[in-house]
Image: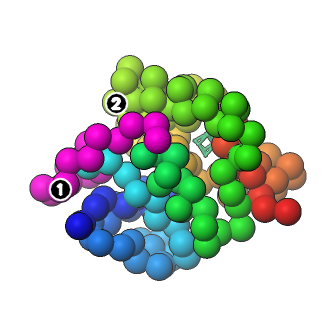
Amino acid sequence: MKKHWRCFVCNDIHYGIKPPEICPTCQVKNAYVKTSSAEAETICGGAEAEKVDFNKDIFLEAIEKFTENNEFQVNPDREKVNLLLEGIFNNEKNHGLKYCPCRLITKDFKEDLKLVCPCNFLIHSTYKEKGECWCGLFKRRK
Ligand code: SF4
């Protein structure tokens, strides 16, 4: 079944059974995370798609899968992850997209696309220095 996928680096949206290994827009490898059709449509005015009710469990499953071939993992601290997911889903309810739970949106849609979770956290100083994204949802594997 075809699904929507979003590149966590440049927000490229792909619709297909599997995401491309390399993002055709920003050329980053293993960059796609499964996303909801609602999110894809908000980002790019997307096409018809399977309607997936993206609850927290499905989102967690998607980001776990996304980390499989990457150098990072979802934080093993499940209590922390649950709190962050709560914030992400509250942001979606209140502001339309799954924005980062620990940063403020600017209300500039293009700018705020950089805050859709997972964001391009590999460029964050916290990831480079401490091995985790700003909020600690993702951690570098040991
Ligand atoms: S900093 Fe972490 S929690 Fe926040 S959007 Fe980026 S990946 Fe998600």
Going 47% across and 54% down the picture, which residue do you hit? 62
Vertical arrangement, residue 75 with respect to residue 107, above or below: below
The amino acid marked with disc number 1 is Ala
Comparing labels 2 and 1, the label whose residue is closer to the camera = 1
114 vs 86, nearest the viewer = 86
125 vs 59, nearest the viewer = 59
Q: Position of residue 128 (x, y in %)?
A: 81, 56
Does the magenta segment cover residue 59?
no
Residue at label 1?
49
Residue found at the very far left of the displayed protein: 48
Q: Are marks 2 and 1 in contact (CB under 8 Å)?
A: no
Residue at label 2?
96
Does the magenta segment cover residue 53?
yes
Going 46% across and 41% down the picture, which residue do you hit? 57
Q: From the viewer's perspective, tell me whether residue 70 is left or right of residue 5.
A: right
First in sequence: mark 2 vs mark 1? 1
Q: From the viewer's perspective, tell me whether residue 114 is left or right of residue 83.
A: left
Q: Which quadrant is home to the C terminus?
A: bottom right
Q: Which quadrant is home to the N terminus?
A: bottom left
Query: Crowding at label 2, few (<14), some or many (≥20) Cα neighbours within 10 Å?
Result: few
85 vs 123, nearest the viewer = 85
Going 24% across and 66% down the picture, which residue do you hit? 2
Here the colouring is: rainbow
Q: Quadrant of residue 91?
A: top left
SS at mark 2 in the image = loop
Q: Position of residue 20 (x, y in %)?
A: 40, 77
67 vs 76, nearest the viewer = 76
Could you tell me if residue 95 is visible in this image?
A: yes
Stretch of the chain drawn in magenta: 38-57
